[in-house]
Image (cartoon, helix red, strand yellow):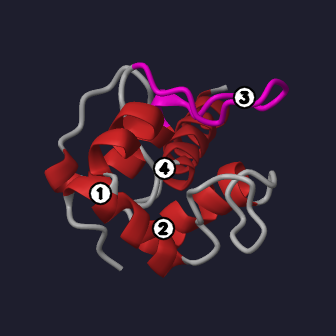
Amino acid sequence: MKSFLTGMGVLMCCAGYVACTSEQAPKPGTSVSCESTVVTSARIYAIIQQNCTNRSCHPGGSSPLVADFSTLAKLKTYIHANGSNWRLRVTGPTADMPQFTGYPPLSPATRDSIACWVDKGMPD
């Protein structure tokens, strides 16, 4: 029994290590400084593609909406030009993106990751 419990402890420890990488936001309800959180442009852009461009909302080209997130450069340009609106709609406490029925809202942890990335100057 003791070896089983020891094995479970190792498994739980490893599962916790694997479940959280430096590119993931902290668990909801935990307070982690943006200074110690590492979030890359590649990770954030993957989130934007999944939640914003792949749903035909901000794909660029014939996009029905003004914001064109078809490339990382266009996303960064939009955020630089529309920072207060971005914070209000995407990362703020009352953020409403994505808006369409049937799509889940961004989780607080995802919004926090995006906000940290923007606050750090959107580093690559």
Contact, CB < 8 Å: mark 1 with mark 2?
A: no
Eyeballing the image, is 54 above or below 122? above
As helix, strand or loop, the secondary structure at mark 2 comes to: helix
Q: Nearer the viewer, mark 1 or mark 4?
A: 1
Where does the image place residue 88, in percent across and percent down from the top left?
Answer: 37, 32
Q: Distance between the residues labelled 1 and 4?
A: 21 Å
- Earlier-in-chain disc, 1 versus 4: 4
Q: In this view, does 101 lie to the left or right of 110?
A: right
As helix, strand or loop, the secondary structure at mark 1 comes to: helix
State the residue lying farthest toward the right: 102
Say which residue appears at 54% left-offset and 45% top-offset: 10
Which residues, given as a range, are shown in magenta?
Answer: 94-109
Q: Which mark is residue 107?
A: none
Where does the image place residue 106, in percent across and percent down from the top left?
Answer: 58, 34
- Earlier-in-chain disc, 4 versus 2: 4
Contact, CB < 8 Å: mark 3 with mark 1?
A: no
Q: Nearer the viewer, mark 1 or mark 2?
A: 2
Pick the front one: 99 or 3 = 99
Contact, CB < 8 Å: mark 4 with mark 3?
A: no
Q: Distance between the residues labelled 4 and 2?
A: 26 Å
Contact, CB < 8 Å: mark 1 with mark 4?
A: no
Say which residue appears at 53% left-offset and 36% top-offset: 9
The residue identified by callout 4 is 20
The residue identified by callout 3 is 104
Residue type, numbered disc 4: Cys
Q: Which mark is residue 118?
A: 1
As helix, strand or loop, the secondary structure at mark 4 comes to: loop
- Earlier-in-chain disc, 3 versus 1: 3
